[in-house]
Amino acid sequence: KISEETLSHAIALVEWSSSHARPVWKGAAQGNSYHVFRLAEYLLERAKEGRLPERISAWWLGKRIEFLDSASDIRRALLRLEQEGWLVRAPTKNGMAFILNPKLLPKAKA
């Protein structure tokens, strides 16, 4: 037999752990955030130095960074930065290109 008090504690524990598990699973489903943050730092640093190209592409990044292993990892990170508001999609004839969100430019120049 399980007492009412034990059942109440179990329900409370499940509710508490569920609320904490959701963000963890969401992050896991979207991929490793560490590399996304590193890419954001890299782009912001390049912008501060005035060395960011007009358009940011997976091809351009692939020639310059080593912390993302493949073109698909780079594309996923770029899309995540777009989703988070760091990047804005730029028109292009082929492939995918982005620009740094203009709202971030004052931070890049600081």
Image: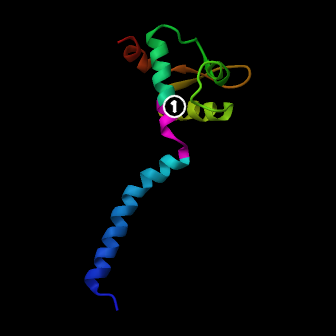
**Residue 31 in sight:** yes
Report whether 13 appears left or right of 57.
Answer: left
Question: Going 42% across and 20% down the picture, which residue do you hit?
Answer: 103
Report whether 75 appears left or right of 15.
Answer: right
Q: Amino acid at mark 1?
A: Leu
Report whether 103 appears left or right of 43.
Answer: left
Circle 1 sits on which residue? 81
- Quarter location, residue 98: top right
Any magenta on residue 32? Answer: yes
Question: Going 49% across and 39% down the picture, which residue do you hit?
Answer: 33
Any magenta on residue 55? Answer: no
Figure check: 31 above or below 60: below
Secondary structure at numbered mark 1: helix
Quarter of the image with the C terminus in it:
top left
Residue farthest toward the bottom in the current orientation of the protein:
1
Q: Horizontal and vertical percent for residue 3?
A: 29, 87
Residue farthest toward the top in the current orientation of the protein:
50
- Region of the chain picked out in magenta, as a range: 30-37
Residue farthest toward the right in the current orientation of the protein:
94
